[in-house]
Amino acid sequence: MDNVEQILLKMLPGKEERDTYTVFYLQSKWKSICGENVARHSKPVKLENKVLYINTDQIGRASCRERV
């Protein structure tokens, strides 16, 4: 993340808002994180207790799994 994003994260009032911002950030970079094929069939949707939840269009399709 660049400096503007780091400043924005510090300005957000709580953990839930920062987690929501992080999910939007991951969604914007998803193709470069997981590759085109996985990104086409999956999408990060929620960050909770340092666990990233990802929706996929088929069970077992997405192979990009990481603990934040």
Image (cartoon, rainbow, N blue to C red):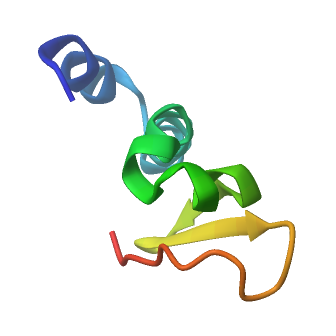
Q: How many marks?
A: 0
Residue 26 appearing in the image:
no
- Above or below — where is 13 with respect to 63? above
Residue 53 pos. (x, y %): 62, 70
Report the front residue among 63 and 46.
63
At 54% across and 79% down in the image, what residue appears? 63
- Above or below — where is 27 with respect to 48? above
Report the front residue among 54 and 37.
37
- Above or below — where is 65 with respect to 38? below
Left or right of 17? Residue 57 is right
Residue 8 appearing in the image:
yes
Q: Residue furthest front?
A: 37
Residue 16 pos. (x, y %): 53, 48
Left or right of 42? Residue 63 is left
Q: Residue furthest right?
A: 57
At 40% across and 27% down in the image, what residue appears? 12
At 22% across and 11% down in the image, what residue appears? 4
Quadrant for the C terminus in the image: bottom left
Left or right of 53? Residue 68 is left
Quadrant for the N terminus in the image: top left
- Image quadrant in which you'd find residue 56: bottom right
Q: Residue furthest top?
A: 4
Residue 45 pos. (x, y %): 68, 55
Q: Residue furthest left?
A: 3
Residue 43 pos. (x, y %): 68, 54
